Amino acid sequence: MNAGLPSILAHVGAVPPPDRVNFALPRSVTLPRVSFVVPTLNEAENLPWLLPRIPDWAHEVIIVDGRSTDDTVAVARRLREDVKVVMEPRRGKGAALQAGFRAATGDIIVMLDADGSMVPEEAIVFVSALLAGADLVKGSRFIQGAGTDDMSLFRMFGNRGLTLFVRLLYGGWFSDLCYGYMAFWAKHVATLDCDCDGFEIETLINVRALKNHLNIVEVASFEAPRISGESHLRAIPDGWRVLKTIVRERVHQQHRPSAAACEDGGQARCES
Ligand SMILES: Nc1nc2c(ncn2[C@@H]2O[C@H](COP(=O)(O)OP(=O)(O)OP(=O)(O)O)[C@@H](O)[C@H]2O)c(=O)[nH]1
Ligand SMILES: [Mg+2]
């Protein structure tokens, strides 16, 4: 495990975030249809923690796999018989999320990692901000009430530098750039037109949302360490891809949504 923020903060005498947030939703509240899109690559050992925590108000849970060599898909089906499984053979989290977005039938899409680092119960905070008027809600690990125990100092500085670079080039006040816990109205999928395959997908969504003047809100989120298995992120090559995305999107000011995004007809291969 990396030396995470709480342990670093403990050394400088700061107080860790309180563990008393109640995310329960009163039964009388009805929500729009919320699709949880979960990319998985060899996450069989983490799904027993994750899937039961996805709130019962979820409209659907979509696992996007296709490259796992363990029994991720079988475990998912065993844990949740209504799970939708999308098979995406292309490499990368971005490719997986694109396939998940195409398969989603809800009004709202929540992006959730499968490694146990994101607490599914927090999703109500994201959905609430959307209901309050946001177009896109992104988690931040660096605002009051948030935190991370899953980031090395090296990655923390890299993320900080990239976040400031986005502020410099695009404006806005992001406090966190490369964090995958996000939610948005499904009607914005075509506008965001996520045409990238790798870990730069969160950055692409963020800068396209800024460029298209979407109403973006950050909410506090706590990132726990991955429960089991290896991280798929490689800090330097993936950081480089993020940097190139930031520059390319700035140079090409006007992004034209691709034909595929406009059609919105091409459903990913979906096995329920
Ligand atoms: N389907 C699919 N999912 C992927 C792929 N690469 C990563 N994922 C999933 O994307 C999510 C994020 O990947 P992680 O390896 O946790 O990367 P990260 O959270 O950015 O990095 P860490 O903080 O080190 O965990 C996890 O649920 C992975 O299983 C891929 O090529 N295909
Ligand atoms: Mg992770």
Image (tube, rainbow, N blue to C red):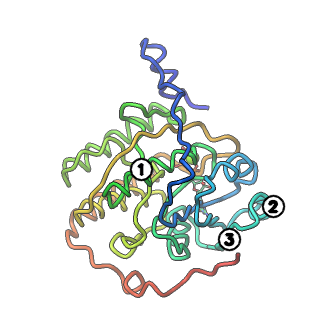
Label 1 SS: helix
- What label does residue 78 carry, if any? 2
Res 70 seen here = no
Res 144 seen here = yes
Of the numbered discs 3 and 1, the one sitting upstream in the chain is 3
Q: Nearer the viewer, mark 2 or mark 1?
A: 2
Q: Amino acid at mark 2?
A: Arg
Of the numbered discs 3 and 2, the one sitting upstream in the chain is 2
Q: Amino acid at mark 1?
A: Gly
Label 2 SS: helix
Foreground pick, 156 / 272: 272
The residue positioned 43% from the left and 34% from the top of the image is 146
What residue is shown with label 1? 239
* Location of residue 138 in the rendering, given as x and y in whole percent from the top left corner: 39, 51
Label 3 SS: strand
Cα separation, mark 2 vs mark 1, equals 36 Å
Circle 3 residues within 10 Å: few <14, some 14–19, many ≥20? many
The residue positioned 32% from the left and 41% from the top of the image is 175
Q: Amino acid at mark 3?
A: Val
Q: Nearer the viewer, mark 3 or mark 1?
A: 3
Above or below for 35 versus 256: above
Circle 2 residues within 10 Å: few <14, some 14–19, many ≥20? few
Q: Quadrant of residue 15?
A: top left
Q: Please state if 22 lies on the left or on the right of 230 as rendered.
A: left
Foreground pick, 138 / 43: 138
* Location of residue 54 in the rendering, given as x and y in whole percent from the top left corner: 62, 53
Circle 1 residues within 10 Å: few <14, some 14–19, many ≥20? some
**Ligand 1: does it lie within 8 Å of the C-beta at label 2?**
no
